[in-house]
Image: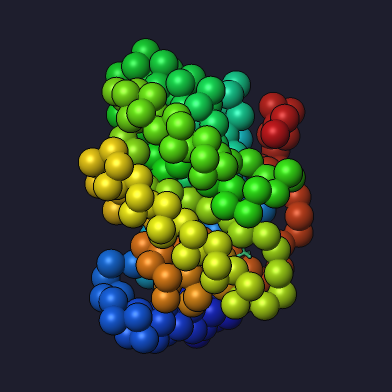
Amino acid sequence: MNEIAENLAAVRAEIADAATRAGRRAEDIELVAVSKTHPPETLHEALDAGQTLFGENRVQEARAKIPLLPGRARWHLIGHLQKNKIRHALAAGFELFHGIDSLELARECDRIANEAGVFPRVLIEVNVAGEASKFGFSPEKLRAEMEELLGLGRLQIEGLMTIPPFAPEAESSRPYFVALRELREQLQTEFRVPLPSLSMGMSGDFTVALEEGATLVRVGTAIFGTRSGKAWKPAADSASFDD
Ligand SMILES: *Cc1c(COP(=O)(O)O)cnc(C)c1O
């Protein structure tokens, strides 16, 4: 087995263990292999090891990679979506957008989805800890704006996503994961909508996230190793890269 196949097997085993501990079924959990910055060859190795779902955080980088991978690869956009990239993002074939982080962005997505004739599946990003440096709705703002979000007829809102404050200890993330789950439950009751998906947990804390109800975990480093920090771009064509 190559290193990526080994890493994937280890992550899947940890997911299965965490699911068992939490009395959940492993089939109800999706592993998003966060492939940002990694070249297509690396993603091929993961595909060969049975991983079909990939998470990218930049529209431009994903658009360059998607045609280079077989059609059975599936793609989620996990990062912040810039308004001037919405049209490209909707056309790129992402199955789910994890980072709808403001009402303004949601309105713009809805408008462009209407023009494009599509119904994108989305998650609402919540800044549970209220960090100034992070994107996302505060829980209060989300409650105040939920009615309007739900009225955006093109967006299929399937749940919530969060990125807790960075901490070396996985346990430090637990209160934020609990808060996201409780917010989801309140919103479901208050607005009478199903919000089945919770995207939470990364390499350092995904098992804790699973114990607290994550249905999607976004794992990069534990599968692919340390990132270079720079977006991947095709060697021959770098002129149009601006994000
Ligand atoms: C990069 C990224 C991840 C993956 O982080 P790792 O610590 O490498 O697992 C998860 N979620 C988002 C939104 C990211 O940008």
Q: Residue furthest top?
A: 115
Residue 115 is left or right of residue 226, and the answer is left
Q: Relative to 229, is 240 above or below? A: above
Q: Nearer the viewer, residue 198 or 46?
A: 198
Residue 86 visible in this rendered orientation of the protein = no
Image quadrant where residue 124 sits? top left
Q: How many marks?
A: 0
- On the rendered structure, is 173 left or right of 111? right
Q: Please name the residue shown 28% across and 38% down the image.
A: 191
**Foreground pick, 167 / 93:** 167
Q: Residue at x 48, y 20 (%)?
A: 108
Q: In the displayed structure, would residue 124 be above or below residue 185?
A: above
* Position in image of residue 162 (x %, y %): 53, 53
As drawn, 160 above or below 83: below
Between 55 and 210, the one lying in front of the other is 210
| Residue 25 in view (yes/no) | yes
Image quadrant for the C terminus? Answer: top right
80 is higher (above) or lower (below) than 117: below
Position in image of residue 225 (x %, y %): 66, 71
Q: Quadrant of ligand 1?
A: bottom right
Image location (x, y in percent) of residue 176: 55, 62
